[in-house]
Image (cartoon, grey):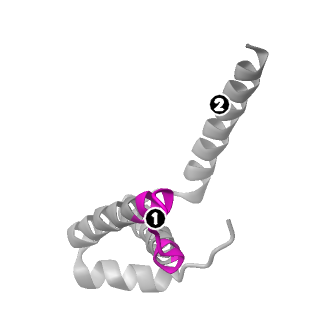
Amino acid sequence: MNINVDKSIVSKSIKHYGEGMQSVVCMEELSELSQAISKEIRGIGDRSNLVEEMADVIICLEILKQIFAVTNVEIEEWVKFKQGRTLKRIKYEKKD
């Protein structure tokens, strides 16, 4: 995913609002995305709202990376592991 999030703006928001408050906002944004997905599944969604909430969560991921000093390399390692595991499960299920 090549979406550019301005890390300097994220850093300024953390400094201005504080790590605790920004963490809480991230939790709220994750919940809002969950609600938008639920509405899409039920056929009452608003695509614009779904995309907006996805954007908020992408920004929040950068906020959380900075707050908890998580690197892209660490995340990429987990993504690779989890996708590999999913692929193995898919292959296993096809054999049944």
Give how far across and how far down residue 87 sits, in percent. 72, 33
- Where residue 49 sits in the image (x, y, percent)? 46, 77
| Disc number for residue 85 | 2
Decide which of 69, 47 is in the foreground and name it.
Answer: 47
**Left or right, residue 95 beside residue 32:** right
Secondary structure under tag 1 reads helix
The image shows residue 9, relative to residue 22, as above or below, that is below
Q: Name the residue under label 1.
A: 61
Q: Tell me which secondary structure the magenta stretch mostly adopts.
A: helix
Q: Residues within 10 Å of mark 1 (few under 14, many from 20)?
A: some
22 horizontally vs 86: left or right: left
Crowd rating for badge 2 (residues with CA inside 10 Å; few <14, some 14–19, many 20+): few
Is 96 magenta? The answer is no
Task: Please tell me the numbered disc located at residue 8.
Answer: none
Amino acid type for the residue under numbered disc 1:
Leu
Element marked by disc 2: helix
Question: What segment carries the magenta color?
Answer: 36-51
Marks 1 and 2, how far apart in space?
Answer: 23 Å
- What quarter of the picture does the N terminus occupy? bottom right
Query: Residue, x 67% and y 42% (percent of image)?
Result: 80
- Displayed quadrant of residue 42: bottom left
